Image: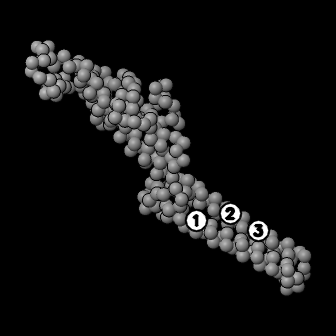
Amino acid sequence: MGLRFVGYCDVISDSIRHTGWFTDPDQDNKIRGCVYQLPGRGGKARFVAAHDNEDNGAADCGGPAYVDFSTVYRSDFKHEMFTALETISKQYQTPAMLNPSYWAEAAHDTAKKEAARAANDFAESQAEKEREYQTAWQAGSQYAECLQELAAIRESVRQTIRDMKGACATLRTLPDSLKARLRSSIKAELRQRETIFQRMERLKGGEADSLYFWPGDERLQGAFNEGADSVVLR
């Protein structure tokens, strides 16, 4: 197809004042909009919007990119000429300026900047989707960790009772001080269990700390379940 990397959108357009969009809630990774050029037609340049992904290597270093071919941004000499002449007084206009090809370079630049703005929007949209997915996945992963913590608490309570039974024939014969310790230990672990249950509900509801997501979205339900390694959301 003859695609040629032109540059990153923030380098091409001064109106874009950042170097990419974060794709995860921890802001460790991001994707950056970029522009590619197609072979020209009829002397007119053609550009398309794209974005790279830091995980796969930067586009300016030969890394892969995701290209949006739905819209091709072409240089329009006549439109560039008419737009420019509206800002130039007639006394300063030259015969050469009335030839559309005179504005070829400016038209190429305009098309390139249009593609850059589209690339930035493309990257933002894809980053938002990935960020939502990663957020739901992390929530599911933490849900699985909560299950492990609950299992550890259950085993701890059982072990505490076993230890006390080992010291005395029955729980009824335990000294009051040991009974108090046992009750205190079990109550503390039950409180901890309740705290974990509450967190699990927030995680499922997409309302835990910074892990906010919409649990009614099937795609995000899948991400949560994948992170939890079990079917929790349906």
Q: Is residue 200 left or right of residue 153?
A: left
Question: Which amino acid type corresponds to the residue marked 1 in the rendered image?
Answer: Arg
Picture layout, residue 135 above or below residue 92: below
Q: Residues within 10 Å of mark 1 (few under 14, many from 20)?
A: some
- Residue beneath the point at 32% across and 37% down: 118
Label 2 secondary element:
helix
Which of the 4 quarters of the picture holds residue 178? bottom right
Q: Which residue is mark 1?
A: 199
Return the disc, 1 or 3, that comes first in the chain's sequence: 3
CA distance separating discs 1 and 3: 20 Å
Q: Which residue is mark 2?
A: 149
In the rendered image, which quarter is residue 74 located in? top left
Q: Earlier in the sequence, mark 2 or mark 1?
A: 2
Residue drawn at the location 52% of the way across and 44% of the way down? 27
- Tell me if residue 87 can be seen: yes
Residue that mark 3 sits on: 156
What residue type is disc 2 on?
Glu
Tell me whether the residue at label 1 lies in contact with that at label 3, contact meaning CB atoms closer than 8 angstroms.
no
Left or right for 30, reference 173: left
